[in-house]
Image (tube, helix red, strand yellow):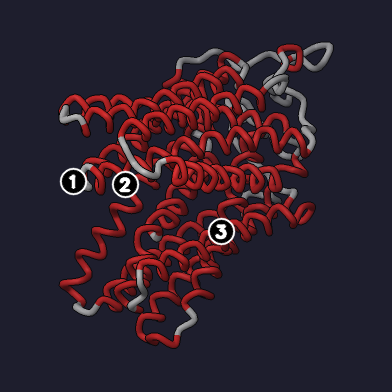
């Protein structure tokens, strides 16, 4: 007998509705980048504090995101996602304002009090991102028809990156000339606008009546305690394998970020402006790769097709890293810009396909919030470790291998192996029947 499905809002959200949910991601991204980029720079440059301090604060914001499964489970029990998004965004906005306030305290000479305030602020930022980001993905999964999920995943993430761009551009104009008071005012204004944007975007998105669409709605999941629900979910082979895939692929993805610009400067002798332009080309390639998945449309409707795109994107990313490893030996004649664009294109394609796969997998059963929270926690841990692992590996390779091209090449080849490992995990999931999702019958149902 087929297991009952959890009541949820009706699928079939139109493109306008998908764009509205994308605005929520834009708001989230605009606040996060303000704290991890602008405030990070102010602490290091204007306040002349050790770079370790903002590094630890950003690491704390990632560490708090291990709470994503717990928050996803909470939204499963309640049955509604918008209160978690709004509450999470409120915490994120308060954290953004608090981080700017902490800088004001530090600038005024109250360093210890400022550090304590920053710790509280970044805890709020991590908790807010966890609650709002997890619930947003679950709501997107519930409201978007399967045929549109790949495109929706790409659109929402492109809009998040747009939030990065808009926030930094606007803050850059308003913060000149810099003063701590101006930073606080600008941060408060941007965070307030982001929160209002979320309220407007979510209006009517999850009506209470939509939670019981049929005349005889199926029962909600049993309200198991969090540990019991997590243990139940973790017994499912596909859930465990996809969690590992998310961790390995995102570890490889994040590990390259801190390497590319220094590589261009130390190995190819590019100036700061030239390496920054190369990085922008790479980010442009990421957007193009996500757009490619969105435009593919019907070609990526099934879970099996999404997994194939994930495999191809990871293999292409591995090839891109291997070519960069060789480029240092080739010298100045290497088309470095083309390599950066190609790597970004591969990264964007696999990332969009992976996010859409997450939505498809979560949509096949109950406890969607817990599963998406589990995968989100794996991504956050990978992002927290990626930069640390790559920089440590480079520091170890330099004295062992001597020349900078060889040291960077060794790190890039290690990164390529991580991408190949992620491709292998994605390919192994494709071999689970004919693209079917075979999991515990108590909580999931087969994709017919």
Q: Which structural element holds mark 3?
A: helix
* Residue farthest toward the right in the current orientation of the protein: 215
Q: Is residue 186 above or below residue 277?
A: above
Quarter-of-image position of residue 330: bottom left
- Residue contact between numbered discs 2 and 1, judged by CB atoms under 8 Å: no
Residue drawn at (27%, 73%) of the image: 407
- First-in-chain label (2 vs 1): 2
In this image, 249 relative to 120: left or right?
A: right
Q: Whole-percent x and y of residue 186?
A: 43, 33
Residue drawn at (66%, 40%) of the image: 360
Q: Is residue 215 above or below residue 440?
A: above
Q: Nearer the viewer, residue 27 or 224?
A: 27
Quarter-of-image position of residue 77: top right
Q: Which structural element holds mark 1?
A: loop
**Disc 1: CA contacts within 10 A as few (<14), some (14-19) or many (>=20):** few
Residue identified by numbered label 1? 50
Q: Nearer the viewer, residue 239 or 187?
A: 187
In this image, 396 relative to 340: left or right?
A: left
Residue identified by numbered label 2? 41
Q: Whole-percent x and y of residue 399?
A: 16, 72
Residue drawn at (77%, 39%) of the image: 15
Q: Is residue 334 above or below residue 395?
A: below
- First-in-chain label (1 vs 3): 1
- First-in-chain label (2 vs 3): 2
Residue identified by numbered label 3? 286
Q: CA distance from mark 2 to mark 1?
A: 11 Å
Q: Nearer the viewer, mark 2 or mark 1?
A: 2
Quarter-of-image position of residue 286: bottom right
**How many numbered marks does the figure carry?**
3
Q: CA distance from mark 1 to mark 3?
A: 32 Å
């Amino acid at each position: 007998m087929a297991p009952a499905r959890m009541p949820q809002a009706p699928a079939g959200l139109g493109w306008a509705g998908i764009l509205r949910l994308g605005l929520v991601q834009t708001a989230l991204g605009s606040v996060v980048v303000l704290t991890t980029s602008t405030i990070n720079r102010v602490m290091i440059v204007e306040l002349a504090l050790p770079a370790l301090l903002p590094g630890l604060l950003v690491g704390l914001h990632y560490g708090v995101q291990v709470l994503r499964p717990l928050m996803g489970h909470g939204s499963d029990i309640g049955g509604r996602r918008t209160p978690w998004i709004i509450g999470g965004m409120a915490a994120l906005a308060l954290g953004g304002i608090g981080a700017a306030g902490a800088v004001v305290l530090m600038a005024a000479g109250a360093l210890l009090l400022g550090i304590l305030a920053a710790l509280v602020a970044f805890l709020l930022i991590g908790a807010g991102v966890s609650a709002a980001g997890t619930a947003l993905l679950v709501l997107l999964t519930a409201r978007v028809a399967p045929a549109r999920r790949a495109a929706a995943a790409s659109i929402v993430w492109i809009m998040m990156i747009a939030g990065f761009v808009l926030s930094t551009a606007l803050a850059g104009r308003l913060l000149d000339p810099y003063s701590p008071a101006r930073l606080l005012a600008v941060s408060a204004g941007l965070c307030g606008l982001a929160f209002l944007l979320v309220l407007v975007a979510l209006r009517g998105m999850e009506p209470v009546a939509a939670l019981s669409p049929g005349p005889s709605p199926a029962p909600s999941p049993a309200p198991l305690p969090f540990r019991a629900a997590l243990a139940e979910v973790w017994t499912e082979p596909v859930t465990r394998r996809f969690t590992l895939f998310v961790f390995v692929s995102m570890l490889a993805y994040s590990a390259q970020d801190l390497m590319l610009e220094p590589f261009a400067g130390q190995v190819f002798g590019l100036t700061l402006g030239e390496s920054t332009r190369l990085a922008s080309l790479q980010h442009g390639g990421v957007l193009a790769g996500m757009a490619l998945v969105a435009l593919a449309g019907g070609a990526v409707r099934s879970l099996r097709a999404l997994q194939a795109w994930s495999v191809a994107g990871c293999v292409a990313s591995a090839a891109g890293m291997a070519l960069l490893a060789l480029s240092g030996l080739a010298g100045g004649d290497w088309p470095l810009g083309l390599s950066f664009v190609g790597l970004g294109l591969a990264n964007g394609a696999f990332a969009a396909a992976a996010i859409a796969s997450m939505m498809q997998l979560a949509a096949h059963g109950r406890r969607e919030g817990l599963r998406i929270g589990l995968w989100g926690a794996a991504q956050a841990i990978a992002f927290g470790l990626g930069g640390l692992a790559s920089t440590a590996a480079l520091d170890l390779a330099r004295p062992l291998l001597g020349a900078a091209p060889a040291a960077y090449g060794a790190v890039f080849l290690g990164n390529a192996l991580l991408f190949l490992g992620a491709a292998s995990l994605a390919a192994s999931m494709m071999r689970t029947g004919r693209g079917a999702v075979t999991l515990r019958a108590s909580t999931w149902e087969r994709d017919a």
